[in-house]
Image (cartoon, helix red, strand yellow):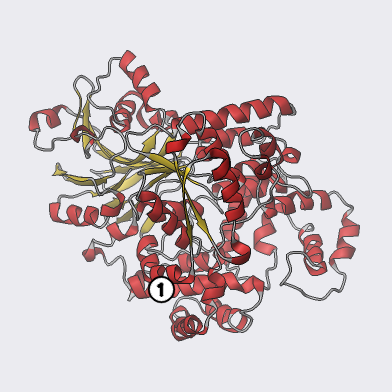
Amino acid sequence: MCGIAGFNWEDKGLVKRMTSVLAHRGPDDSGFFVDNGVSLGQRRLSILDLSEKGKQPMFYSKKVGSCNDVFNKRFLSSARVGVVFNGEIYNFKEIRKELRDKGYSFSTETDTEVILASYLEWGFDCVNRFNGMWAFCIWDKEKNIFFLSRDRLGQKPLYYFVKEGKFVFGSELKALVEHKDLDINCEKNVSKDAVKLYFALGFIPAPFSIYNNVFKLEARQSLVFDLKLKKVVKKWFYYEIPDFKPVYNKKKLIAEGRKLLFDATRLRLISDVPVGAFLSGGLDSSSVVGAMSRFVDLENLHTFSIGFEGKYDETKYINIVKDHFKTRHHHYYFVEKDFEDLINQFSWIYDEPFGDYSGFPTFKVSEIAKKNVTVSLSGDGGDEIFGGYDLHLIGTRLDFIKKLPRIFRLVLAKLPVKKNLNKTFSLFLLKKAFELSLNSNKEFYSKSLEKDNFKPEIFKKWSEEKLDFALRKGFNKLGEGFRLYDLLFNTLGDNFLVKVDRASMANSLEVRSPFLDYRFIEFSQKIPTKWKVDLFKTKKLMREIIKGIVPEEIVHRGKQGFTPPIEEWILKKKYLDEIDDKLGILKKIDLDLFDFLKNKVLKNKEQRLYKNYIIRLFLFVKWWEKWAI
């Protein structure tokens, strides 16, 4: 696990500065290459092959293997390719064996070397053979190109800047900002579209970033930059998610799901450093610990959890799991002082506006984990694979409503009912459901509660495009469409996966999740919707898969999000005064947004619907103070 950076000209001092601000991603070592019109740099967190041989940038020759000695001119003249790489290829040993049979030589025990050999053998298609998480840049000397790629779900970040023939890439925005002459982080370069998307979604989705001319490479996407022509010549999605094709054999699906859980967990235990696990007491993290019990000595397995006071606390369920497996457990209660201590650091960690406040306790649990391990497994992705959110239930209910005669839905949509946005269920929301059933499926996010939410045109276009894609992959069923929308674009992608990556890597901790194995994506497309969610219950098939793997009390428990009481803390006067003082910032960016926040959100801040906007506004103000002034 590492931090990477580079650009298409030579400047050793600049590439060193870029990688130095990424030292938290790789505190164990650093490496640079500046020659032949390129600059490449990397910070290393040693996970596999802890020797000097695993250092990057790494160069490769089919006959000799790899070398990372940038002063070995003889070897470098024979090596066609070099790489800087962030991530893990879990099936690298199987690929290495296949390549050895084809005549390739290997001189390390790293997956980095396998990436280079795979590229020489299969070209751009090599990424289709990888099971893992990655962001890398391969420099092909012969073709005179940079080849960049990002994993199928976007677990590892990769930003790039392109303008007037200059191409810069890096793991985090703070590395690109080191290019002072490019004027990246100045007020005039803040992207208005990105700001509007941030307030609509709570995060900035790829390919947007908070800055103009800086982009995120999207999940499952590759890019080629021609170093001679000085331009991006190709960008494409290398992975196609299979269409929804349900298999109505529950016994077979349970067996397949259980086998996959064990194998995906086994692969993510490959490491030359200690591995632990996050444990929330929910189905997902408990299942991962249960699967780990097949491969590790639980008495020496460190598990980590965060508790909150009052209604937010899951300690009861955490204790059930840790007592059942008898792990070496570490529990910490996250309190208001922890939040206050992290406020200013939060904007440095995420370095563009990011509205998921569970990033605060995620940082804390990562900090605790790092004291004991270098790698931690998590349950991320279980909800998106098996249908774990209330919205997935709502999608199934809307599919049911849409089967009713249109005239009946039209009448119910016009019933006069009192507006109520403070309850999860009300007659007002039921009326809105009938209204939405009259629209096309892809308009759900752009039309739902349109008058009460911030829904700029850029959001409507983005959400309709992404939901339309998810619906096509989900046989035009809202239940499947909402789940895939979350899996690919909304809750994971540039949201939850960003939260976990930045919070963990700020502590030099690598996080791996078995449920993010691409085989689980494909498996989810075979599970009938009724075995994911029905009108009342979520994760139905998953509960059957994990029977006997986790304690029975966990199998039958309901969903509880990782939600600290931060919304209550932010509503205190000292923070609201600060928000009021800085609100004018947004006047220059978008008047509609400014009016919405001033006249709707801040005047109705106690309404449940608007609390997330208060948090987004607070975290935006903090980001502005850190980066944009």
Q: Residue at x 87, y 55 (%)?
A: 406
The image quadrant that residue 373 belongs to is: top left
In this rendering, the count of numbered labels is 1
The image quadrant that residue 233 belongs to is: top left
Q: Is residue 335 visible?
A: yes
Residue 405's spot in the image, x, y percent? 89, 53
Q: Is residue 343 above or below residue 230?
A: below
Q: Quadrant of the image for the C terminus?
A: bottom left
Provide the secondary structure element on which disc 1 rests. helix
Q: Which residue, given by chain and number where applicable, does mark 1 sit on?
A: 622
Is 470 in front, or is 597?
597
The image quadrant that residue 384 belongs to is: top right
Residue 573's spot in the image, x, y percent? 51, 84
Q: Is residue 207 visible?
A: no
Residue 494's spot in the image, x, y percent? 48, 54
Q: Is residue 157 above or below residue 450?
A: above
Q: Quadrant of the image for the N terminus?
A: top left
Left or right position of 561 against 238? right
- Local packing at callout 1 (Cα closer than 10 Å; few below 14, some 14-19, many 20+) is many
Q: Residue at x 53, y 69 (%)?
A: 566
Q: Is residue 16 above or below residue 354?
A: above
Left or right position of 106 against 13? right
Is 156 in front, or is 608?
608
Left or right position of 119 against 458? left
Residue type beneath disc 1? Lys
Left or right position of 547 against 436? left
Residue 84's spot in the image, x, y percent? 27, 41
Q: Residue at x 73, y 38 (%)?
A: 531
